[in-house]
């Protein structure tokens, strides 16, 4: 199965079910499918072909989903970029590295994109979703979809002169669907190539692990450029035919908290900092949501992307009465490797490996360690990336001799198979011959009532 099949099957099975809800709009699966097809036609008539890359620098919204699926429908590659990256040289690097043919963006990010295009010194089409007269060869995205406008970002031919449908492409499960740039701590980031099969398998394994169902209502507040939100919220909802309530920003929290209640959200995903804030503001939130019978609907919240302290988990669950299931993964694994199940949790762990994913702990010499011993966490499965774009040596160095991805994280498996993450391998400190993990020191510091947040640097 590829991503196109995922959307096609759900739209055929449940065309009138609500797919996406925002603060101002509601889209059925039929409408989403139609808009994706329209986007695919527009991209095709503009000259985008199989294997071409187009970057997405967008906040959450239907346009992100439409552009992404419009591209993969052609066998092209979506390149979601963190919209917080505004330095022209960083943007230029990513656009040049993937040889992007264009960028779909919005007005607030145009300045950085235009500056990057100047540095790029290569043709780069720009489509903006929320501006009419941006100039500088920037075309409004809706006009582009409708076949209007002129210039390099417009369709190569008018709609009446072109085939009525985009070329029928059926990517294989091994074809690249997306390239996501990791936030490198040294030098420029590397582009992680994820295939259709990587994303679909991780979506389906996440559904199985969390016992998600069509009747669930999923909240997406984390940015869609991140695989945690994309796979764990967007793809999961599309595969199930579930309603996805989408917020274009994580802060302020008030608007999306109201949306949770108004639309009967049952499942949501957030980072630990969000759970910490919600725990502290629980009294006000309860007053805000009481009229929506909020607490009768939410089954659980999922946590990932950073370590969740047991204190934060206990405080949130005590204040809100909602369990948290913590998981673990990387961009390179689409992203989920393991997660606590709603009915099978172990506080402090990141759960059991998901379906079809193997996890082992290794020494420096790549020999496998027994349960209870700390070493580098490694994973193997259908969710593991194809490699780093343009970096074959870095790709080879990231895998063990027997094909496991080395995560760069230190952890252990207990006797029951639960995974515990200690810290990044590079953040481990040796003190008098003993291993000290910065994350554990931070947990101790954060447990003090007068400490909001801490970070160990050195």
Image: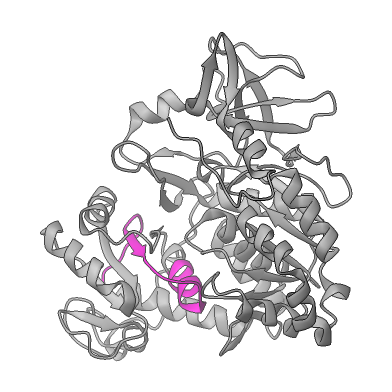
Q: Position of residue 88 (x, y in %)?
A: 21, 59
Q: Position of residue 183 (x, y in %)?
A: 40, 46
Residue drawn at (61%, 81%) of the image: 255
- Magenta residue check for 50: yes
Q: Quadrant of the N terminus?
A: bottom right
Q: Is residue 437 above or below residue 66?
A: above
Q: Quadrant of the C terminus?
A: top left
- Asked which quadrant contains residue 122, the reply is bottom left
Residue drawn at (49%, 59%) of the image: 170
> What range is drawn magenta here?
46-70
Using the image as rendered, state which of residue 60 and residue 72 is in the foreground. 60
Image check: 445 left or right of 428? right
Residue drawn at (37%, 87%) of the image: 142
Q: Position of residue 75 (x, y in %)?
A: 42, 59
- Asked which quadrant contains residue 274, the reply is bottom right
Image check: 82 left or right of 305? left
Q: Position of residue 135 (x, y in %)?
A: 17, 84
- Magenta residue check for 247: no
Using the image as rendered, state which of residue 69 and residue 428 is in the foreground. 428
Using the image as rendered, state which of residue 308 and residue 385 is in the foreground. 308
Residue placed furthest toward the front:
450
Residue drawn at (43%, 45%) of the image: 193
């Amino acid at each position: 199965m590829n991503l196109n099949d995922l959307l096609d099957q759900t739209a055929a099975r449940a065309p009138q079910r609500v797919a996406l809800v925002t603060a101002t709009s509601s889209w059925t699966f039929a409408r989403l499918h139609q808009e994706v097809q329209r986007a695919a036609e527009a991209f095709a008539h503009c000259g985008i072909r199989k294997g071409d890359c187009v970057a997405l620098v967008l906040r959450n919204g239907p346009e992100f989903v439409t552009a992404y699926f419009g591209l993969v429908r052609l066998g092209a590659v979506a390149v979601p970029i963190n919209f917080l990256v505004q330095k022209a040289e960083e943007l230029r690097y990513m656009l040049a590295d993937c040889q992007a043919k264009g960028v779909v963006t919005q007005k607030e990010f145009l300045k950085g994109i235009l500056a990057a295009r100047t540095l790029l010194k290569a043709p780069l089409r720009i489509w903006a979703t929320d501006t009419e007269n941006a100039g500088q060869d920037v075309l409004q995205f809706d006009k582009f979809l409708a076949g209007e406008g002129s210039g390099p970002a417009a369709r190569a031919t008018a709609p009446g002169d072109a085939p009525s449908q985009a070329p029928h492409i059926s990517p294989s499960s091994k074809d690249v669907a997306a390239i996501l740039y990791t936030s490198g701590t040294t030098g420029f980031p590397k582009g992680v190539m994820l295939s259709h099969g990587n994303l679909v398998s991780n979506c389906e394994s996440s559904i199985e692990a969390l016992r998600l169902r069509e009747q669930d209502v999923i909240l997406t507040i984390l940015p869609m450029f991140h695989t945690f939100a994309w796979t764990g919220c967007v793809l999961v909802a599309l595969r199930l035919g579930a309603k996805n309530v989408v917020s274009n920003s994580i802060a302020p929290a008030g608007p999306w908290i109201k949306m949770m209640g108004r639309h009967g959200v049952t499942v949501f995903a957030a980072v630990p900092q969000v759970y910490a804030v919600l725990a502290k503001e629980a009294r006000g939130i309860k007053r805000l949501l009481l009229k929506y019978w909020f607490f009768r609907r939410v089954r659980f919240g999922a946590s990932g992307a950073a370590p969740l302290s047991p204190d934060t988990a206990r405080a949130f669950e005590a204040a809100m009465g909602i369990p948290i299931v913590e998981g673990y993964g990387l961009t390179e694994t689409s992203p989920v490797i393991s997660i606590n199940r709603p009915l099978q949790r172990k506080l402090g762990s990141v759960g059991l490996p998901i379906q079809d994913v193997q996890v082992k702990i290794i020494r420096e010499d790549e020999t496998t360690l027994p349960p209870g011993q700390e070493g580098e966490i490694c994973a193997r499965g259908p969710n593991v990336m194809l490699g780093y774009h343009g970096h074959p040596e870095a790709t080879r160095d990231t895998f063990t001799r027997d094909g496991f991805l080395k995560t760069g994280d230190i952890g252990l498996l207990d006797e029951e198979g639960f995974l515990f993450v200690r810290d990044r391998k590079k953040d481990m400190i040796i003190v008098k011959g003993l291993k000290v993990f910065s994350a554990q020191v931070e947990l101790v510091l954060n447990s003090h009532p007068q400490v909001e947040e801490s970070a160990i640097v050195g």
